[in-house]
Image (cartoon, rainbow, N blue to C red):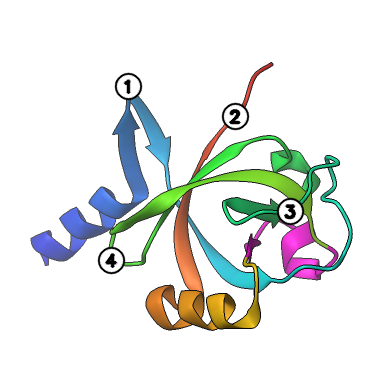
């Protein structure tokens, strides 16, 4: 029981540069090229995500549900889906459907996210 509690605490709070950062569990889907620029005017590329407008311009550290680090992503787009708008999901940009399937098979439908507010 203590190990389960410790694991839950480990996965919910991480320290970065001495500051505790809370991890959120979020639904994670993929989106593909649409022929349009992102909400902030950027040409889409792998390494960006879409979320709600509150996180536009922020960085997101993504982790698997087991706590394995996936990578750092820039929130440069917003989504139209209800879960994206209410902040309970993110959309990871992938260049093509094969890359989207690769993501889904590797990481699944949920990730842990640490949001880092961008300045400047």
Q: Which mark is residue 117?
A: 2
Residue lying furthest left? 2
Give the CA separation, mark 4 to mark 1.
Answer: 22 Å
Give the residue displayed 20% in from the left and 58% down from the top. Answer: 7
Task: Indicate which disc, 2 or 3, sits on the residue closer to the N terminus.
Answer: 3
Give the CA separation, mark 3 to mark 1.
Answer: 30 Å
Q: Which mark is residue 17?
A: 1
Q: Which residue is mark 4?
A: 66
Task: Indicate which disc, 4 or 2, sits on the residue closer to the N terminus.
Answer: 4
Place residue 32 in its image quadrant: bottom right
Task: Indicate which disc, 2 or 1, sits on the residue closer to the N terminus.
Answer: 1
Q: Determine whether, in the image, residue 97 is placed left or right of residue 80.
A: left
Place residue 42 in its image quadrant: top right
Give SS at disc 4: loop
Q: Determine whether, in the image, residue 52 is placed left or right of residue 5.
A: right
Give the CA separation, mark 2 to mark 3.
Answer: 20 Å
Residue lying furthest top? 120
- Tell me the quadrant of the picture where the C terminus can be found: top right
Task: Indicate which disc, 3 or 1, sits on the residue closer to the N terminus.
Answer: 1
Q: Is residue 90 magenta?
A: yes
Of circles 2 and 3, which is in front? 3
Q: Which residues are magenta?
A: 80-93
Give above or below for 17 relative to 40. above
Give the CA separation, mark 4 to mark 3.
Answer: 29 Å
Badge 3: residue crowd in 10 Å (few <14, some 14–19, many ≥20): many
Give SS at disc 2: loop
Task: Indicate which disc, 4 or 1, sits on the residue closer to the N terminus.
Answer: 1
Task: Indicate which disc, 4 or 3, sits on the residue closer to the N terminus.
Answer: 3
Give the image location of residue 104, x and y in percent.
49, 79
Give above or below for 5 relative to 100. above
């Amino acid at each position: 029981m203590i190990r389960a509690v410790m694991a839950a605490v480990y996965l919910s709070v991480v320290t970065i540069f001495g500051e505790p950062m809370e991890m959120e569990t979020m639904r994670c889907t993929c989106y593909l090229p649409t022929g349009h620029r992102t909400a902030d005017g950027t040409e889409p590329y792998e390494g960006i995500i879409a979320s709600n407008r509150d996180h536009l311009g922020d960085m997101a550290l993504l982790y698997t549900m087991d706590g394995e680090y996936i990578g750092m992503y820039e929130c440069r787009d917003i989504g139209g889906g209800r879960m994206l708008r209410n902040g309970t999901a993110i959309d990871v940009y992938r260049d093509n459907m094969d890359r989207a399937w690769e993501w889904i098979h590797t990481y699944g439908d949920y990730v842990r996210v640490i949001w880092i507010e961008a300045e400047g």
